[in-house]
Amino acid sequence: MCAMTATPATPHAPAGSLPLNPTYRTHMCGALRAAHDGHTVRVAGWAFRRRDHGGVVFIDLRDTTGVVQVVFKPDALGAAAIEDITHTGLESVLMIDGVVRLRGEGLTNPKMATGEIEIDVRAFEVLSRADPLPYALTDDSVPEELRLSYRFLDLRSDDVAATMMLRSDVIASIRQRMWGLGFREFQTPILTASSPEGARDFLVPSRMHPGKFYALPQAPQQFKQLLMISGFDRYFQIAPCFRDEDARADRSPADFYQFDLEMSFVEQKDVFAVAEQVVGGVFEDFKNWNGNGRKAGAMAMTPVGSWPHIAYDDALLRYASDKPDLRCPLEIVDVSDIWAASEFKVFKDIVAQGGVVRAIGVKGATTQPRSWFDTIGKWAQDELGAPAAPGYITWKEGAFGGPLTKFLSEEQIRAMFAKAGVGEGGVVFFVAGKEPGIYKILKDLRLRLGRDCGHYETSIYKFCWIVDFPMFERADDGSVDFSHNPFSMPQGGLHALETQDPLTIKAYQYDLVCNGYELCSGAIRNHLPEVMLKAFRIAGYGEETVKSKFRGLWEAFHYGAPPHGGMAPGVDRIVMLLADSNMVREVIAFPLTQRGEDLLMAAPSAVTEKQLKELHIKVAAK
RNA sequence: GGAGGCGUAGCUCAGUUGGUUAGAGUAUCGGCUUGUCACGCCGAGGGUCGCGGGUUCGAGUCCCGUCGCUUCCGCCA
């Protein structure tokens, strides 16, 4: 385990300055240096590696600060002691009394921070013996399933441990920044009421109320709004959230943590300013963290205070995504009108039937070999499910090329290149189809083209705000539903709700996006009961539902509610990005599997009949 | 709910066209080794090839089903 790189915002004491109890240790393993030569020390830790030379035995002893070599010599300890340490399993916990010695000439190990010294053992005690390990801690090819089954061992490996410490440091940094800005931290209930909106709830049966259930909160949404109405003005919480939905690589299947915040008497720009200071500040502090050795070099980031705002509709057009990865500079443009006026029947028909043709211009792509264009076409069909290989037109040595060229006039082609923002040497790709199905193809094609043609930036955190989300959307069954958050303030307020087509109404609703990951959602909230009632009515919820299911907010809005808003960045995702990982499980100490199981604790599990009876629950036969 | 990938010793993997007793590295155990640092050398034990069924004279290998992990779609206000 390597010593952590010190970071300016880490409020923790540096490794090696921990208060120590001399019953167990006088020094930390990783803190010993040449300056300790001749010091009598007591250290304690895990037997990480052993090298047995029949007489002298070396053990690398590991604690949270690092590794130090301890030397067992038969002359000093006797044959029985050497026999004992030889048969003590790796990962046993040892307490060592010894003397720090400079290593002899040619015996130092420059790969170790403590490599100039070793501890000459005078006495030792095995505090806990370890069985043979299910896998070697130094083996980095062990599958995740096994490592999660023995997560307590997995957490001993230095990169995993370093990531957990990063997580702690990130949360500490968030708290310090928020306290510095005058926010207060609150705790809100873990057992609350089920909500008809949003994700599937985890339910907890009530013993005292037969047939009734608590729900674990999907977010502290209503509570933080109530705190605003109570007048606290600035709230935050590192809040556990629970959603019973299927997992993804970047989405934990049950519980996750949000850095939840809310402010009163603010507009959208005020929330953005706090977010850029705090989230941006955390990234500035930790962007170069490399405790797991993954980053190739220093990381850049979008400067705080200049994170671009992109309207939701604009994001869908330009990036085919509401969480665009801006490391790829390529943008999508609409060229439906040009193709509608062309002789190419396939695209003409698609436009005539309400579809669109979108184009991605790639500078310099004419240098790609023919085989690359074929690979892209096959990949788009096989992996992205494109109905046909994306068409393309090349502009090379004064001439336009590609199978689609013959359907267009030169003016039309030139107009296309101008719109796509590329000139000679460039290639314009086309994808035709209906929205929104076409977005999935365009989104991944844009990134692939950028990567393949060298336009994709690495070693940078690219932030942007996605703003002006629609308030409502059409559900699969044709009805109108909330598109994001039912508590958002619609732009135009009650007047918009009463006069506009609901599907055209925007909300003061926003997301923060970094490198293609949705880092948080937020909104300026509605604080008026009549707006709440009207918005829910449009989404198909009657007055009685609002009054019963959202009683707290409904009541509170009648007794003086300030304008307020906030957001909730995902702690797991922030740490994941800083750790240069794409798996959220890597930044969670005890993550669940994809199917929501804890392999170590064997959860979920059956319970006794007695427990069920107390809870008035009967399990139906399958 | 749907689609793909993976599953052989404690662990990581190899295993030819279906053909004798399923191999290697590592770990474990035993022996040797007083300066290594992923120490080294010699030897031993360790297998229901995820599970079930089928085809076949014969299945780790082919087919069907199923279970587990995982990636993606749906889902995630």
Image (cartoon, coloured by chain):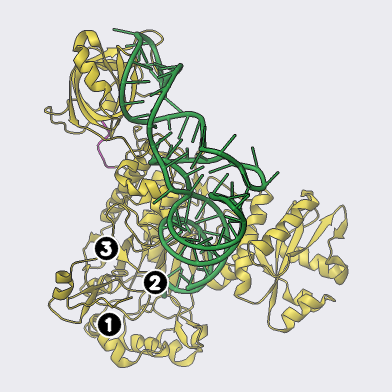
Chain colours: A yellow, B green
Q: Chain of mark 2?
A: A
For the residues labelled 3 and 1, the Cα–Cα distance comes to 33 Å
A43 to A458, vertically: above or below: above
Residue labelled with disc 2 = A523
User: What stretch of residues is rendered in magenta?
Assistant: A11-16
Label 1 residue SS:
loop
At x 81% / y 58%, what residue is drawn?
A394
Placement of A305 over or under B74, stated as above or below: above
Image location (x, y in percent) of residue A499 = 47, 92
Query: CA–CA distance between discs 2 and 3?
Result: 38 Å
- Residue A123 seen: yes
Residue depth check, mark 2 versus mark 1: number of the one nearer the observer = 1
Q: Nearer the viewer, residue A120 or A406?
A: A120
Residue A605, labelled with which disc? 3
Q: Amino acid at mark 3?
A: Ser
Q: Check chain identity for marks 2 and 1: say if they share one.
A: yes
Find out whether residue A433 is within the magenta segment.
no
Residue A263 percent location from the top left of the image: 30, 67
